[in-house]
Image (cartoon, helix red, strand yellow):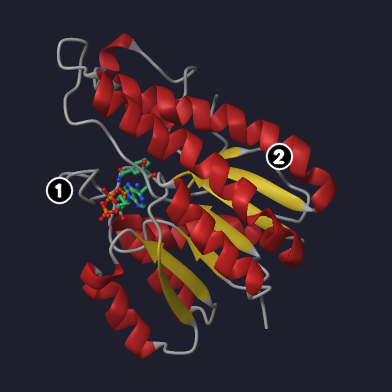
């Protein structure tokens, strides 16, 4: 049986849709979220797939939470084939006038340092699962080459956090190549979630299906790319 997939922010949005799609495709999933007690939809999936879904608490910005989860999985000698860093945050107010330091730091901690240190903490499990893959859910909004003044949408913290995530992931891809751990950055499209808003054209299940198709097509050793949910390469 294939080693399980580990997902952050699995209680709603794209993370929940990825969990559902992986379970439907007979994969095992370690689904993590901040408040498992409030994750009703995740528990419903657990009832439907009792032996293939493990739900564990994880606040990706909290070192104690990360350390305790990593210690549990390492103690269990759990190999991981796929780590999906999906949890993400966006600031509430856009533009320079609305920027505030606390929000900025929260977004960077969630979108940049959290996925980086989660990879570091879970390295023993990824090495046990190798060849393995880390998927970083990034965004086209982090692409400097795609940026035009007409785009507006000046969420300074969010856009620059995804740009930083791209850079650190390219470096991780270099460093982890020797461990047979590949790293891929994926843009899920504009998706109708709490973050994406109701007007977004893509439903979470369609984004998740596309993301998993792209992941499934990647060969071992293909690492460091920035792709969208249809597999198209994106400009940095
Ligand atoms: N929706 C889009 O159009 C779009 C486009 C490009 C990229 N993305 C990226 O896709 C990913 C998923 O976004 P989404 O659209 O599904 O957003 P969402 O519906 O707002 O969900 C965000 C998820 O992240 C979790 N999260 C936030 N902070 C966390 C923390 N400190 N610890 C653990 N979990 C935390 C949330 O958990 P709680 O319920 O506990 O808050 C929730 O599960 C993000 O990385 C986002 O940047 C989304």
Q: CA distance from mark 2 to mark 1?
A: 34 Å
Q: Residue at x 61, y 51 (%)?
A: 121
What secondary structure is marked by label 1?
loop
Q: Is residue 157 above or below residue 31?
A: above
Q: Residue at x 30, y 24 (%)?
A: 104
From this viewpoint, which residue is outermost toward the right?
178
Residue 197 appears in which quarter of the rendering?
top left
Q: Residue at x 69, y 59 (%)?
A: 126
Image check: 93 left or right of 171? left
Disc 2 marks which residue? 173
Within 10 Å of disc 2 (Cα), the crowding (few <14, some 14-19, many 20+) is many
Q: Is residue 55 above or below residue 154?
A: below
The percent coordinates of residue 233 (x first, y second) are 57, 36
Disc 1 marks which residue? 198
Image check: 11 left or right of 122? left
> Which quadrant would the C terminus be assigned to in this image?
top right
Q: Residue at x 31, y 74 (%)?
A: 42
Which is nearer the eye, 135 or 66? 66
Within 10 Å of disc 1 (Cα), the crowding (few <14, some 14-19, many 20+) is few
> Which quadrant would the N terminus be assigned to in this image?
bottom right
Q: Which of marks 1 and 2 precedes in the sequence?
A: 2
Q: Is residue 178 above or below residue 19?
A: above
Image check: 15 left or right of 195? right
Q: Is mark 1 within 8 Å of ligand 1?
A: no
Which is nearer the eye, 232 or 119? 119
């Amino acid at each position: 049986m294939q080693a399980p997939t580990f997902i952050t922010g699995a209680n709603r949005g794209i993370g929940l849709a990825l969990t559902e799609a992986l379970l439907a495709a007979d994969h095992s999933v370690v689904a993590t979220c901040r408040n498992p007690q409030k994750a009703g939809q995740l528990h419903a999936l657990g009832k439907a797939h009792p032996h293939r879904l493990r739900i564990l608490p994880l606040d990706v910005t909290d070192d104690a939470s990360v350390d305790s989860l990593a210690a549990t999985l390492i103690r269990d000698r759990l190999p991981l084939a796929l780590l999906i860093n999906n949890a993400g945050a966006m600031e509430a107010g856009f533009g320079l006038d609305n920027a505030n330091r606390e929000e900025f730091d929260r977004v960077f901690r969630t979108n940049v340092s959290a996925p980086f240190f989660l990879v570091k903490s879970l390295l023993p499990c990824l090495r046990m699962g190798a060849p393995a893959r880390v998927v970083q859910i990034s965004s086209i909004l982090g692409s400097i080459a795609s940026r035009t003044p007409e785009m507006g949408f000046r969420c300074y913290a969010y856009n620059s956090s995804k740009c930083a995530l791209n850079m650190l992931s390219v470096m991780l891809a270099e460093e982890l190549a020797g461990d047979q751990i590949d790293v891929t950055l994926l843009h899920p499209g504009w998706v109708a979630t709490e973050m994406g808003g109701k007007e977004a054209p893509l439903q979470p299940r369609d984004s998740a299906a596309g993301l998993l198709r792209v992941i499934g097509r990647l060969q071992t050793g293909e690492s460091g790319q920035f792709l969208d949910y249809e597999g198209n390469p994106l400009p940095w």
